[in-house]
Amino acid sequence: MTAAQFASSSNNTEQFNSIPSDGRVDWVDYAKGFCIVLIVMMHSTLRMGETMGGTGFLHYVVEFARPFRVPDFFLIAGLFLANVINRDWRLYLDRKVVHFFYFYVLWVAIQFAFKAPFSLADGHSVGHVFGSYLLTFVQPFGTLWFIYLLPVFFVTTKLLKDLPWYFLLGGAAFLQILPIETGSVLVDEFASRYVYFLVGYLFAQHIFRFAAWAMANPVASLTGLVIWGLTNGTLVAAGYSKMPFVSLALGAFGACAVVLASCLLSRLKAMDFLRYIGQHSIIVYLAFFLPMGVTRLFLARFMPEMDIGIMSVIVTSISVVVPLIMYKMVKITGLGKFAFIRPKWAYITKEHKKPQPSLQPAE
């Protein structure tokens, strides 16, 4: 059975048939919100630690989440691919490549606009800065590597969808296990992460069934989370989490744990803000660098005696909230829509399977 045939069976399951017409699934949004907060936390905490020359309690949380933080994000990204992978290439490229390429190019330019003056002040020439900018098109830049790599996953999967599913999955797992360290972000991260995206695509029906079971069995789900947490924490603390096979297993089981946690969180109305963050996860991902940098420098300059862990919590919180406020202001005022909403001219096709707004949100 080919990968496309294996994955397409997901479209016939009760789980997919019960998805709301707006395409939103609560636990998926919670999972995306959970993961984007962890990603922002990682950058905020590590940068804060570097600035202050020390570590805080949040560094341990960051290290605990390392095995599953990014794998789960890619797994979620592959969940609904079976529904669209058979689209014609022009429409597929528009939705899965041009869409992300537009935001990557735009936000690389925005980040360089902020970083270039500091680079010049450090003695680098204009030519060096411009060369660094051009390099971002072959070597993904800073925090934006995820949306650079995601279109590569989409194209690769469509090209290889007629291979036997077990051959494709086995090859991706083999790449993850190999100690590939070329220095190229594209090559290294592709090898390390593609298997999780592929699992989301191939096993979507099973993941949705697992989520349905978790929703119906909260006590068992919570028990499983506790067992997983103790196991993951022990292996991370012992320094085994980056070992071949162990890394793959922790990424897979960690992704399952996030599904469990997201299903449990979706039962709590008090955690609804996490669902909202997940619905706008790409907005946060694109823009968090700016409030993160400003808040970090402010705290280091004016509150240097504050605990590094508390500093990291503050930076993380502001870095998540400010992009959402920015997006809300853009929608209210209509100013700067191009930063978060792909404009009409950035489409390569106007074909739609059903009526859609002329402007498409980043997520």
Image: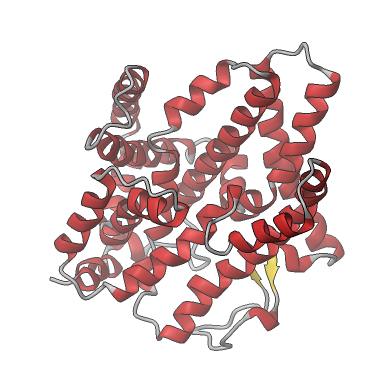
Judge whether 246 appears above or below 204 on screen: above
Image location of residue 278, percent across then percent down: 56, 48
Q: Is residue 270 visible?
A: no
Image location of residue 321, percent across then percent down: 71, 41
Q: Residue at x 75, y 57 (%)?
A: 110
For the C terminus, the image quarter is bottom right
Judge whether 235 appears above or below 335 on screen: above
Q: Residue at x 15, y 62 (%)?
A: 167
Image location of residue 262, percent across then percent down: 44, 40
Residue farthest to the left? 1
Image location of residue 267, percent across then percent down: 47, 38
Left or right placement of residue 153 versus residue 269 in this view: left
Q: Residue at x 77, y 53 (%)?
A: 125
Q: How is the image coloured?
A: secondary structure
For the N terminus, the image quarter is bottom left
Judge whether 176 appears above or below 161 on screen: above
Return the residue nearer the eye: 336 or 155.
155
Tally of numbered tags: 0
Q: Is residue 308 visible?
A: yes
Return the residue nearer the eye: 15 or 320.
320
Q: Residue at x 57, y 21 (%)?
A: 58
Left or right placement of residue 360 versus residue 227 in this view: right
Left or right placement of residue 67 versus residue 9 in this view: right
Judge whether 324 appears above or below 293 on screen: below
Left or right placement of residue 88 versus residue 309 in this view: left
Return the residue nearer the eye: 123 or 298.
123
